[in-house]
Image (cartoon, grey):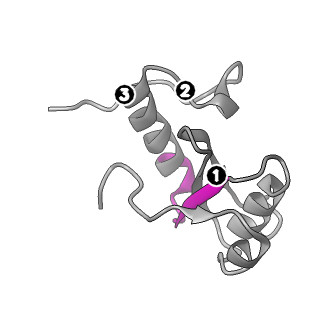
């Protein structure tokens, strides 16, 4: 498995979100410029990934998403955030000013 998320981007519509499993995992949200959010659906998330993504619908038009279903969602979330920080030098917009995962992924 790649360290970066590799699933294709999908438009954030009700129809597409309805196809997402109601399980735990991580996801990215993007607009026309790039990734704006990295988050996870954990054990306390209502309807898992589907519910978490559904909360993003209506916040902004033209959003895209991709996700990974994984039981190791906290570790994978930290990893995806660290990859983003390595690439862009800062956390995505949804993590600015909050207690975001620290550390960096080593690149060889």
x and y, in percent, of residue 19 in the image: 67, 81
Q: Secondary structure at mark 2?
A: loop
Q: Residue furthest left?
A: 108
Find the magenta span and give its range: 63-75
Q: Is tag 3's residue or tag 1's residue first in the polypeptide sequence?
A: 1
Residue identifier under label 2: 91
96 over 82 or under it: above or below: above
Pick the residue in front: 87 or 103: 87
Residue identifier under label 1: 40
Badges 3 and 1: C-beta atoms under 8 Å apart? no
Badges 2 and 1: C-beta atoms under 8 Å apart? no
x and y, in percent, of residue 61 in the image: 77, 51
Mark 2 Cα shell of 10 Å, populated few (<14), some (14-19), many (≥20): many
Residue 67 among magenta residues: yes
x and y, in percent, of residue 71 in the image: 54, 65
Q: Quadrant of residue 32?
A: top right
Q: Is tag 3's residue or tag 2's residue first in the polypeptide sequence?
A: 3
Alpha-carbon span between mark 3 and mark 2: 9 Å
Q: Residue at x 68, y 57 (%)?
A: 41
Residue identifier under label 3: 86
Q: Quadrant of residue 17?
A: bottom right
């Amino acid at each position: 498995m790649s360290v970066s998320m590799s699933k294709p981007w999908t438009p954030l519509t009700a129809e597409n979100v309805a196809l997402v499993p109601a399980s735990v995992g991580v996801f990215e949200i993007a607009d026309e410029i790039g990734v704006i959010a990295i988050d996870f659906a954990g054990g306390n998330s209502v309807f898992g990934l589907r519910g978490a993504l559904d909360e993003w619908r209506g916040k902004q038009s033209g959003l895209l998403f991709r996700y990974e279903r994984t039981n190791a969602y906290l570790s994978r979330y930290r990893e995806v955030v660290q990859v983003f920080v390595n690439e862009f030098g800062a956390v995505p917009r949804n993590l600015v000013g909050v207690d975001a995962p620290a550390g960096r992924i080593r690149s060889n």
